[in-house]
Image (cartoon, grey):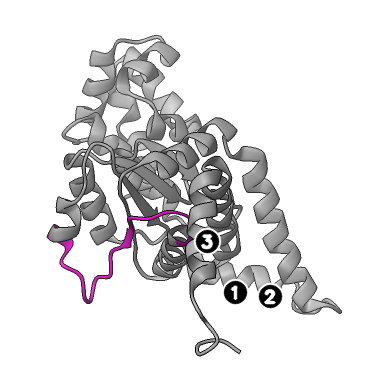
Amino acid sequence: MDLQGKVKNIFADLSNSQKKVAKYLLDHPQKFAVHSASEIGKEVGVSETTIIRFCYSLQLKGYSELQKQIRNSLIFENSSLNEYYSSKKQVADQPNFFAEVMEQDIASIQRTIANLSEKDFTKAVSKLTNSDYVLISGHRLSFSAAHWLTFTLRLVRENVCLYKQDTDDLFLLLNKLTENSVFVAISFHRYVKETLKITEMAKEAGAYVIAITDSELAPIAEFADLMLPISKIRTSTIDTAPVLFSLCNALVAGVSIQDEDRFTKRKAIYDSFNTDDFFL
């Protein structure tokens, strides 16, 4: 039985105050996912203790377990691959199929532009510019974006490292982190547990954690100092790629502009190399 079914099943046995909580949960599950028990209590007009007792009535250990179940139900309710196929099937009969698919990407980018906090983006750029060391991690599809971000960020600043699962010693990389370092975690549905664990370890090491993800409800939020969520209508991870790379490009552009002197010096270093033997 899902969480909604459990709430309905026990509703009649709840106290009047707990029934208020139950009704609010059924109507606004997303608020429980991102707000504390005390904040929800103020919204509903009950005490924090009532919220906790409501959790116990659901046979849960506490509010954090309730939040976890709500987040899972909100995030994993659809198959990522099925949604990807369905969204493309809808435009398969259009005269310009490629144009329709690319228009979907454009819409996702515009949606992210509208919803992304300029203040948060500016802070992310500042942290990436001024940190002594940047460590970047991502798995599965997120690894390609993490690799691109690392390579490109290295062009405009020094001390940028990508965690490569197959070849790197994770503990040596994490040992380099200080309170002046930045850890960038790229994490998308379906969320890889290893990314979450590494992010937790980076947080414990004192690094400032920037999470690039697909939802403010994503599990990575627990360890992030700053979230850069990509807004999208579908859960398909494949559909996030164009927006993800566009956001990464904007971050690199911001770093290159914010520290113009360093960028000029880095450019001079590259210009000094004789690359005739490597490029046509």
Question: Circle 3: is it few (<14), some (14-19), or many (20+) Cα within 10 Å?
Answer: few
* Badge 2 amino acid: Lys
The CA span between labels 1 and 3 is 46 Å
| Sequence-first disc among 3 and 2 | 2
The residue lying toward the viewer, choosing from 259 and 77, is: 259
Describe the element under mark 1 as helix, strand or loop.
Answer: helix
* Badge 3 amino acid: Ala
- Residue placed under numbered mark 2 in the picture: 89
Describe the element under mark 3 as helix, strand or loop.
Answer: helix
Left or right of residue 147, residue 91 in this image = right
Q: Which of marks 1 and 3 is in front?
A: 3
User: Looking at the rendering, which quadrant does residue 178 occupy?
Assistant: top left
Count of marks, rendered view: 3
Residue 5 x/y as whole percent:
37, 43
- Residue placed under numbered mark 3 in the picture: 268
The CA span between labels 1 and 2 is 6 Å
The residue lying toward the viewer, choosing from 33 and 2, is: 33
Residue 142 x/y as whole percent:
42, 64
Residue drawn at the location 38% of the way across and 20% of the way down: 40
Q: In this view, does 76 lie above or below 228?
A: below
Magenta region, residue range: 155-171
Question: Circle 1: is it few (<14), some (14-19), or many (20+) Cα within 10 Å?
Answer: few
Q: Does the magenta stretch include residue 168?
A: yes
Describe the element under mark 2 as helix, strand or loop.
Answer: helix
- Residue placed under numbered mark 1 in the picture: 85
